[in-house]
Amino acid sequence: MTSDFRPTVAVLLPGTGSDADFVTRAFSEPLTARGITAVAVEPDPRRFIAGYFDALDASSRHEPIIIGGVSIGAAAALHWASTHPDRVAGVLAALPAWTGAAADAPAAAGARFTAARLRADGIEKVTAEMIASSPAWLGLELAKSWRSQWPHLPSALDEAAEFRAPEVEELERLAVPVGIVAAHDDAVHPLDVALTWADRIPLAGLATVSLDQIGADPAILGRESFRALESLLP
């Protein structure tokens, strides 16, 4: 990174089952403070990842952009950045879930299980069970976003579970700077994944937070990932 790092647009990619409202609250504060316009993508569960890539293509036609992503959004951001390095000024990667193929990664296993339950039992029953078993803030967030993506939500969950994040070798070749933030107590998005990304990406910074901190103030994801990104400046 150089001192003329002056992007004006950031495209924000939600996690699986999440929505544009959450990533806006997570990332817009530090972006707006730096004069960067945040464009949050509302997921289309019928063409989940393709919709993300379409938004990145459209927003980066005239100048390099920042990409902010949560969970599968972070993996999609790195994948797109690896093939369009000249169109990306930096990536803010929050709560990465796996490297390479998902296999039995907790987030992927949970997505598959939830998709099957939704098809079998419907959204009301599964949402109620999710709320009862999740941190209060997360249950409320997902209840809202799940309903907005129904009835196509199961397809998006299955697609996310099959998405291949960059392999270690691809991380090592990544030519853009990445600020990573992980929750040290998040079993679904293991800290080890973030540590691997931070270790293997040539220009990467890592910050850690807790799930309670995210629940109290989602903007901590944006502040800490941007702080990690700016730590790479000379």
Image (cartoon, helix red, strand yellow):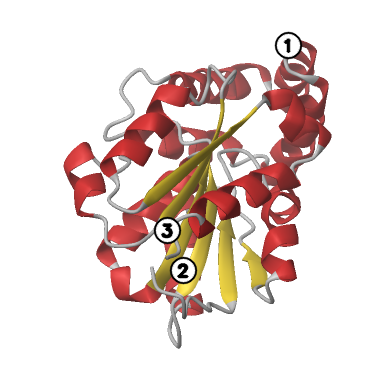
Question: Which residue lies at the image location 73% right of the left edge and 11% below the top edge?
Answer: 133
Quarter of the image where the C terminus is located: bottom left
The part of the image, by quadrant, that contains residue 103 is top left
2 vs 3, front mark: 2
Question: Which residue lies at the image location 45% right of the left edge and 88% below the top edge?
Answer: 62
The part of the image, by quadrant, that contains residue 87 is bottom left
Q: Is residue 143 visible?
A: no
Q: Secondary structure at mark 3?
A: helix
As displayed, is residue 163 above or below residue 108?
below
As displayed, is residue 41 above or below residue 222?
below
Instruction: Tell which circle, 2 or 3, labels the residue nearer the N-terminal end.
Output: 3
Left or right, 153 with reference to 166: right
Q: Residue beneath label 1, please? A: 133
Q: Amino acid at mark 1?
A: Ser
Mark 2 Cα-neighbour bin, 10 Å: few <14, some 14–19, many ≥20: many
Q: Secondary structure at mark 1?
A: helix
Residue 164 rendering spot, x and y as whole percentages: 30, 40
Residue 225 rendering spot, x and y as whole percentages: 57, 48
Quarter of the image where the N terminus is located: bottom left
Q: Residue beneath label 2, please? A: 56
Residue 42 rendering spot, x and y as whole percentages: 64, 57
Pick out the residue farthest to the left.
169
Please say if the residues under marks 1 and 3 sit with CB atoms less than 8 Å apart: no
Question: Which residue lies at the image location 51% right of the left edge and 20% below the top edge?
Answer: 110
Q: Amino acid at mark 3?
A: Ala
Q: Is residue 74 visible?
A: yes
Question: Which residue lies at the image location 75% right of the left edge and 39% below the top edge?
Answer: 147
Residue 50 image label: 3
As displayed, is residue 24 above or below residue 61?
above
Q: Secondary structure at mark 2?
A: helix
- Whole-angstrom CA distance, mark 2 to mark 3, is 10 Å
